[in-house]
Image (cartoon, rainbow, N blue to C red):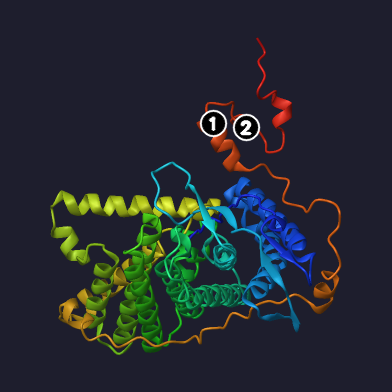
Amino acid sequence: MPFPFSLPTASSISFTDYFSSSTHPSLPNCATTARGVVRDVLKRYKRIPPSSQASNLSTVLSALREYIPYLFALDAGLSGTSCAGEEIDLVLVKELEVEWRSTLASTLPGREPARVKVKSLESELFFTLSTLAHVYSLQGRAQLHTLYNATLPSPEQRKTAISAAMAHFLDANAVHTYLVNRAHQWNSQPVAVDITTPVLGALAELSMAEATIISVLKDDPYPAVIVEERNKQNKDWMFRGIEIPKVRAHLFSRLCLAAAEHAAKAHAMLSRAKVDEKLVKYVDDLRRTAKAKACRFIGCDSELAGKTGEGIAWLRGARKELGFTALGADEEKKSSGSALGLGKLKKEWKEKREDRKVEKGDGWGSDAGKFEEGRIVDMLLKKWEKMNDTMSIQTIPPSEQLISTMPSGREIHTPKLYIVPALEEDAIVRMRAPPDPGEPFEGDEDDSADEERGEAAGEAPGMPVGAFPGTRGEYGVGSSYY
């Protein structure tokens, strides 16, 4: 369900070229070393297979947490505020310039996003913190993957994974909200779309929408039923039926509506920015999925009260919200139009493609759970229509009238505050000493921007196609065999 964010990469810089301190002369040197570790970790993360990236997120998170306190120490020195109880005298030698790869900007299909040159320490801080928020979101995504693969988790494992994912999304929301509040101090929007105020605000709303809809997933029994049906190794259907417990349908519907409202706000903000169309479509799909879940829960409440016809109308309204055909089973049989059959085949093809993505663990969830919710609605709609045709025989009201009477959303989470990390007191004390005579660590990984410039100028490429990173010399690049 969560969006598969790509982590950015950055060029190498040395803070000693841009800042100097009379009170803590080792601060720029230490900040350069910490940033070099972050740069190397991000480049290695980008080069490993996507299915293996989730296991490397903890390494990226650890490197970012080591580097961010140094950034805030430099920021405190420039702004004249104290850091860990000490005043840092920092002088700007020249304006900081650094390149970051924009991962949210719209690009041509099949082309990697371009590197964007940004200036000032503030832009470096924003890109680093937004990367931290993306890591939190990806960690939540990795936790939820255990619920959607073919192996059905136990109730304890399911509860643990959902609680951990919820905490990660709330952490991401805290970072994005902090950046939005800090961005109000800017006189003009930055060049990189990733750190503009509308995009940061949209990401804050998106993370809150995901944290809200996950709180419903914890007690929603129907996704587990769909996973159980998808499991080819499951043979329980031979000797027992599916047991679905009662749920607090009215409460869950209001939580889903709150998630839909957050997603709608995010979609409105992103529609004004030049961001990747995949992200815009995902946010719209999340809004549709959340509202369809609300319709489904209200329909379950009506069916439990004996109003089967009204429950069927709610399910048909849920299908309309998802963008699928809202025809019932009898109407589908009577309809002879080819468009309906092609639409059904297209939907089934997309569902199977999403199943393959879940099995591989690569690129899954790009539909924001829309097709999974469609499966649940179809399962209930088929069951209830059969019951209504044979037993209840109730009239089915128009779904549009029912959807117009939906209640307002209800918030469940209190937004967390991002606590600015500060360097420990002993680290501040050590930086009073002069810097080491050796050069600060700026990263060992090759700079992809240098490779791109060389290829554009007609030089030999920096790495042969298919070569393993770090083995450039073994391929004789730049020489000829003839």
Q: Considering depth in this image, is 22 or 244 the residue closer to the camera?
A: 22
Number of disc labels:
2
**Residue located 40% across and 78% down the image:** 259
Labelled disc at residue 455: 1
Position in image of residue 248 (x %, y %): 42, 88
Circles 2 and 1, Cβ within 8 Å, touching? The answer is yes
In-image side of 122 versus 64 (left or right)? left
In-image side of 255 versus 302 (left or right)? right
Cα gap from disc 2 to disc 1, whole angstroms: 8 Å
Q: Considering depth in this image, is 217 or 439 the residue closer to the camera?
A: 439
Query: What's under tag 1, amino acid-wise?
Result: Glu
Query: What's under tag 2, amino acid-wise?
Result: Gly
Quadrant housing residue 80 = bottom right
Using the image, determine if residue 302 lies above or below residue 42: below
- Mark 1 crowd level (few <14, some 14–19, many ≥20, 10 Å Cα): few
Quadrant housing residue 401 = bottom left
Q: Considering depth in this image, is 400 or 311 the residue closer to the camera?
A: 400
**Residue located 80% across and 51% down the image:** 439
Q: Evaluate whether residue 142 shows in this view.
A: no
- Mark 2 crowd level (few <14, some 14–19, many ≥20, 10 Å Cα): some
Q: Which residue is mark 2?
A: 462
Position in image of residue 118 (x %, y %): 52, 56
Quadrant assignment for the C terminus: top right
Q: Evaluate whether residue 283 shows in this view.
A: yes
**Of callouts 2 and 1, which one flags the residue occurring earlier in the amino acid sequence?**
1
Position in image of residue 122 (x %, y %): 56, 67
User: What element does badge 2 sit on?
Assistant: loop
